[in-house]
Image (spheres, rainbow, N blue to C red):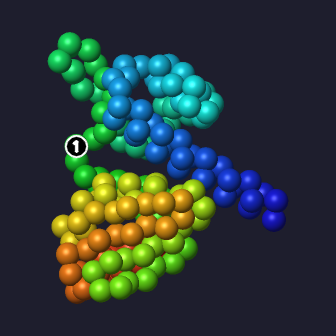
Amino acid sequence: MYEQFIEVKDCEMKLKRHQKIIDLIGRSEIETQEELARRLHEAGFPATQATVSRDIRELNLRKEINREGRSVYVPAREPAQDTGRYARVLRDAYLSMDAAQNILVIRTASGMAMAVAAVLDELKWEEVLGCIAGDDTIICVVKSEEHSHVVMERLRAFLENV
Protein backbone atom coordinates (compact mmCIF):
# COMPACT_ATOMS: atom_id res chain seq x y z
CA MET A 1 0.00 0.00 0.00
CA TYR A 2 2.77 2.44 0.94
CA GLU A 3 4.73 1.58 -2.23
CA GLN A 4 1.64 2.28 -4.34
CA PHE A 5 1.26 5.69 -2.64
CA ILE A 6 4.92 6.51 -3.37
CA GLU A 7 4.50 5.44 -7.00
CA VAL A 8 1.45 7.72 -7.46
CA LYS A 9 3.24 10.66 -5.81
CA ASP A 10 6.32 10.10 -8.03
CA CYS A 11 4.11 10.07 -11.12
CA GLU A 12 2.33 13.26 -10.05
CA MET A 13 5.68 14.97 -9.44
CA LYS A 14 6.98 13.83 -12.82
CA LEU A 15 3.91 15.16 -14.62
CA LYS A 16 4.17 18.49 -12.79
CA ARG A 17 7.90 18.66 -13.60
CA HIS A 18 7.14 17.96 -17.28
CA GLN A 19 4.53 20.71 -17.27
CA LYS A 20 7.07 23.09 -15.71
CA ILE A 21 9.69 22.19 -18.33
CA ILE A 22 7.25 23.01 -21.13
CA ASP A 23 6.43 26.27 -19.37
CA LEU A 24 10.11 27.16 -18.92
CA ILE A 25 11.14 26.52 -22.51
CA GLY A 26 8.06 28.37 -23.72
CA ARG A 27 8.94 31.51 -21.73
CA SER A 28 12.72 31.59 -22.09
CA GLU A 29 15.44 30.25 -24.31
CA ILE A 30 17.24 27.42 -22.55
CA GLU A 31 20.43 26.14 -24.16
CA THR A 32 21.66 23.32 -21.91
CA GLN A 33 20.41 20.53 -19.68
CA GLU A 34 22.33 22.13 -16.80
CA GLU A 35 20.49 25.42 -17.30
CA LEU A 36 17.18 23.59 -17.41
CA ALA A 37 18.04 21.68 -14.22
CA ARG A 38 18.98 24.96 -12.49
CA ARG A 39 15.73 26.65 -13.54
CA LEU A 40 13.72 23.64 -12.41
CA HIS A 41 15.48 23.76 -9.04
CA GLU A 42 14.70 27.49 -8.72
CA ALA A 43 11.04 26.68 -9.46
CA GLY A 44 10.97 24.07 -6.69
CA PHE A 45 11.63 20.97 -8.80
CA PRO A 46 15.07 19.62 -7.87
CA ALA A 47 16.26 17.27 -10.62
CA THR A 48 19.55 15.66 -11.55
CA GLN A 49 21.05 15.99 -15.01
CA ALA A 50 20.06 12.36 -15.68
CA THR A 51 16.45 13.14 -14.78
CA VAL A 52 16.44 16.21 -17.01
CA SER A 53 17.93 14.19 -19.86
CA ARG A 54 15.21 11.56 -19.48
CA ASP A 55 12.52 14.29 -19.30
CA ILE A 56 13.82 15.88 -22.50
CA ARG A 57 13.61 12.53 -24.27
CA GLU A 58 10.12 11.74 -22.89
CA LEU A 59 8.81 15.19 -23.83
CA ASN A 60 10.35 14.82 -27.29
CA LEU A 61 12.11 18.18 -27.01
CA ARG A 62 14.58 19.12 -29.67
CA LYS A 63 17.15 21.84 -30.27
CA GLU A 64 16.55 24.68 -32.72
CA ILE A 65 18.73 27.61 -33.73
CA ASN A 66 17.28 30.93 -32.52
CA ARG A 67 17.66 34.40 -34.11
CA GLU A 68 20.98 34.94 -32.35
CA GLY A 69 22.35 31.65 -33.70
CA ARG A 70 22.19 29.83 -30.34
CA SER A 71 20.82 26.30 -30.02
CA VAL A 72 17.83 26.23 -27.63
CA TYR A 73 15.28 23.63 -26.53
CA VAL A 74 11.86 23.71 -28.18
CA PRO A 75 8.91 21.30 -28.22
CA ALA A 76 8.81 18.99 -31.23
CA ARG A 77 6.68 20.41 -34.03
CA GLU A 78 5.20 17.05 -34.91
CA PRO A 79 2.01 16.53 -32.87
CA ALA A 80 1.35 13.29 -31.05
CA GLN A 81 4.27 11.23 -32.32
CA ASP A 82 4.56 9.29 -29.06
CA THR A 83 0.96 8.44 -28.35
CA GLY A 84 2.03 5.88 -25.75
CA ARG A 85 3.45 8.64 -23.58
CA TYR A 86 0.24 10.64 -23.87
CA ALA A 87 -1.82 7.58 -23.05
CA ARG A 88 0.27 7.00 -19.91
CA VAL A 89 -0.32 10.57 -18.75
CA LEU A 90 -4.05 10.15 -19.32
CA ARG A 91 -4.10 6.77 -17.60
CA ASP A 92 -2.19 8.01 -14.56
CA ALA A 93 -4.25 11.16 -14.05
CA TYR A 94 -7.72 10.39 -15.44
CA LEU A 95 -10.62 9.73 -13.05
CA SER A 96 -13.85 10.28 -15.01
CA MET A 97 -15.46 12.03 -17.94
CA ASP A 98 -18.95 13.26 -18.78
CA ALA A 99 -20.48 15.22 -21.64
CA ALA A 100 -22.95 18.09 -21.69
CA GLN A 101 -23.71 18.71 -25.37
CA ASN A 102 -20.42 19.97 -26.86
CA ILE A 103 -18.59 20.29 -23.53
CA LEU A 104 -16.64 17.50 -21.89
CA VAL A 105 -15.97 17.65 -18.16
CA ILE A 106 -12.91 15.55 -17.35
CA ARG A 107 -11.95 14.84 -13.73
CA THR A 108 -8.34 14.07 -12.85
CA ALA A 109 -6.25 13.35 -9.80
CA SER A 110 -5.64 16.48 -7.74
CA GLY A 111 -3.13 18.79 -9.41
CA MET A 112 -3.12 16.87 -12.69
CA ALA A 113 -5.72 18.67 -14.79
CA MET A 114 -3.23 21.00 -16.46
CA ALA A 115 -1.03 18.07 -17.55
CA VAL A 116 -4.00 16.22 -19.05
CA ALA A 117 -5.25 19.40 -20.75
CA ALA A 118 -1.77 19.93 -22.20
CA VAL A 119 -1.88 16.39 -23.63
CA LEU A 120 -5.32 17.01 -25.14
CA ASP A 121 -4.05 20.24 -26.71
CA GLU A 122 -0.87 18.55 -27.98
CA LEU A 123 -2.87 15.79 -29.67
CA LYS A 124 -4.40 18.50 -31.90
CA TRP A 125 -7.62 16.60 -32.55
CA GLU A 126 -9.67 18.63 -35.02
CA GLU A 127 -12.84 18.05 -32.97
CA VAL A 128 -11.37 19.78 -29.89
CA LEU A 129 -11.61 23.57 -29.89
CA GLY A 130 -9.73 24.01 -26.60
CA CYS A 131 -9.38 23.10 -22.95
CA ILE A 132 -9.47 25.02 -19.70
CA ALA A 133 -7.94 23.32 -16.67
CA GLY A 134 -8.22 23.89 -12.96
CA ASP A 135 -6.67 21.73 -10.26
CA ASP A 136 -8.59 18.51 -10.89
CA THR A 137 -11.16 19.41 -13.56
CA ILE A 138 -10.91 20.15 -17.28
CA ILE A 139 -13.55 21.80 -19.43
CA CYS A 140 -12.95 20.61 -22.99
CA VAL A 141 -14.97 22.43 -25.64
CA VAL A 142 -15.70 20.30 -28.70
CA LYS A 143 -17.13 21.40 -32.07
CA SER A 144 -20.48 19.65 -31.63
CA GLU A 145 -22.38 17.19 -29.48
CA GLU A 146 -21.59 14.45 -32.02
CA HIS A 147 -17.90 15.29 -31.81
CA SER A 148 -18.11 14.98 -28.02
CA HIS A 149 -18.90 11.29 -28.41
CA VAL A 150 -15.99 10.84 -30.84
CA VAL A 151 -13.54 12.48 -28.44
CA MET A 152 -14.87 10.46 -25.50
CA GLU A 153 -14.36 7.24 -27.45
CA ARG A 154 -10.81 8.22 -28.42
CA LEU A 155 -9.94 8.99 -24.82
CA ARG A 156 -11.39 5.67 -23.71
CA ALA A 157 -9.36 3.89 -26.40
CA PHE A 158 -6.17 5.56 -25.14
CA LEU A 159 -6.95 4.40 -21.62
CA GLU A 160 -7.70 0.83 -22.69
CA ASN A 161 -4.53 0.45 -24.79
CA VAL A 162 -2.06 1.28 -22.05
Q: Is residue 82 above or below residue 99?
A: above
In front: 28, or 78? 28
Is residue 142 rendered to the left or right of residue 33? left
In front: 146, or 65? 146
Residue 3 sits in quarter? bottom right
Q: Is residue 102 above or below residue 39?
A: below
- Residue located at (33% from left, 23% from top): 29
Percent x, y of residue 157: 39, 77
Amino acid type, callout 1: Arg
Is residue 8 rendered to the left or right of residue 74? right
Which type of secondary structure does the marked residue at label 1 adopt? loop
Is residue 76 rendered to the left or right of residue 11? left
Q: Is residue 6 above or below residue 52?
A: below
- Residue located at (68% from left, 53% from top): 9
**Label 1, residues with CA under 10 Å away: few <14, some 14-19, many ≥20:** few
Q: Is residue 112 visible?
A: yes
- Residue located at (35% from left, 85% from top): 100
In front: 83, or 93? 93
Q: Circle 1 is placed at which residue position?
A: 77
Q: Is residue 49 visible?
A: no
Q: Is residue 158 above or below residue 123?
A: below
Q: Residue furthest right?
A: 2
Percent x, y of residue 154: 33, 76
Percent x, y of residue 96: 51, 78
Percent x, y of residue 90: 47, 64
- Residue located at (81% from left, 65% from top): 1
Q: How many marks?
A: 1
